[in-house]
Image: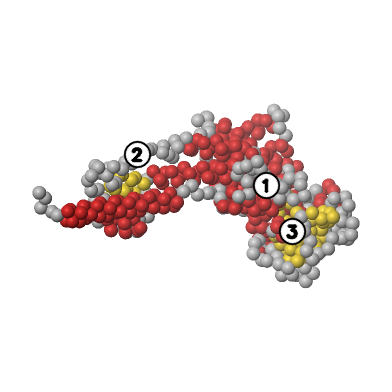
Amino acid sequence: MSIFSRKEKKNIEALKLQNQLQKAKQENTKLSVMNKLIDNVSTQMRSFRSFPDEMYSTGIKQGPYAGMTSSSNNIARNHSRVAVNTSPVAGSIVNTIGTLTVGHGLGLEAQPIWRLIPGKILEEAQSEWAKITEAKYGIWAKKKSIAYDEQLNRYQQEQVEFTRLLIDGEYIELFRYSTNSKNNPMTIQLINAEDVRNPSGSKVAEGNTHENGIEYNSKGVPVAYHIYDYQKKQTVRVLKKGVRSGRVFVNHVKLGANRRGQGIIAPMITELMKLGDYEVLELQAAVVNALYAVWVQTPEGEDPLPTINGGIGDQQQSSEAISAESWMADRKEKNYNEGGLQIDSLPGGYTVQSFDSKRPNVNFGNFMDQVKKNLHSSVNIPQSVIDKSFEKSNYSSARGELILAWFEIEKYRFNQSMTNDLVYRMWLWGEIQQGSIIAPSFFQSEEIQYAWSGAKWIGNQRPDIDPLRSVKANVTEHNRGFKTAKQITAERGGGDWDENQPRVKIELAKVAEMQVPFTETEDVDLTDQ
């Protein structure tokens, strides 16, 4: 006979059931918090994008029209700017080409074509004219007052322009001339590519057409530019050059044969986005692998052991047993972004199966190098030059890579020199009008203007691993008739051999007077490593 009545038995069973329900509720609460934490970690550590979100909604990265940015110059230009500021690969390409081509700015070496200039000018007078002109231009180019907003000097403008050319595919200069200036009247204003836009306030001349802010005559020749004025809130029509004087007002330089240019980064944006996302994922995987979570399985029917916490929190923590309430409060304060150690227990009957993500991939570096190699080849620059890394190359291969890169750099520099020629001619125009420089017959014809403004623009020279070896090779090739002195001089970046001779003659005469002969360095035995 039981000592408990039927009513007491029911109360005991109800109490047990209540305890079990409360225990199950606590376990469910704990599991709910754990799931919430896992979701939180997954959310914070999710595969975020390397580029802004809006670039993933345009179909550039994937889809049937992936990479199609050429349909709109504005889209291609904006995406290229984002890519250069977001992707280290794109930034490295632009910065390397810019440094090798323009560097701190191209310096003037005046080389008038004396044969085309009327009258006979003595060699000494020619040399003196070139020296004076170079000195005056150098002083003018260093002044920030040459810029319309007085923010950049000419050399700094050149750097900005060339960077815009590579990214935007074009740059636009507005030449302004003052009638009140005591100095050279010319100032230069840099115009943003997006500010040359379809007319909104300005008018297109009768019989002309316009496209993307540029006005064309019946032959398709650009005759005017419609530039947006932010003060007037409308476009202003600016002639490309004066009808009577022929003085240039707008200089538009672009890449490609289209009416508006496209930069070198636009065609590779799709690959840059994929490469950037892959790099982010691999780096993210390395961070995730730094977070170790260990759960101790509890036998069925037994209470879980107290948890031991070693994760990274807002404050320094130590391993200690804590209560369920502290466990839940601690989870809210923990920061799982930086990894760490978490040792926890599971309710009875639950099992966690761990796995190794095998990340980051051991082939990550090789894969990145191969993709970058393809991107660098698309701009005709060897990867070693852009990455500034030659440890895998011997003398011959490194020299070959530098030469191949310089072929492309010379092309860019030639195009930039044409802009500098125009700036120099317009500057010389102002100096001659003011009487600061004497150039007879300058305004007689455009051909004579070009003859007086002949110039060589000097910048960074081609890197040479062993200059002495290169010079000796050039001397041998010249003596054997394989190369002319004119070819060698041009390759070495020394200008025109014929134009150099009068100056070299004067310099050698001065050296002889000072009795300081040139000495040749002793031979050095260099072998390929």
Given the image, on which type of amino acid does mark 3 rest? Val
Mark 3 — residue?
196
Given the image, on which type of amino acid does mark 2 rest? Gln
* Image disc number at residue 69: 1
Q: Could you tell me which residue is drawn at 60 percent across and 34 percent down?
A: 400
Q: Could you tell me which residue is drawn at 73 percent across and 43 percent down?
A: 496
| Front: mark 2 or 3 | 2
Residue 413 on image: x %, y %: 69, 46
Q: Tell me the element at label 2.
A: loop
Name which of mark 1 and mark 2 comes first in the sequence. Answer: 1
Q: Distance between the residues labelled 1 and 2?
A: 46 Å
Q: Distance between the residues labelled 2 and 3?
A: 62 Å
Above or below, comparing residue 505 to residue 327 in the picture = above
Name which of mark 2 and mark 3 comes first in the sequence. Answer: 3
Q: Does residue 15 appear in this view?
A: yes
Q: Tell me the element at label 3.
A: loop
Q: Tell me the element at label 1.
A: loop
| Front: mark 1 or 3 | 1
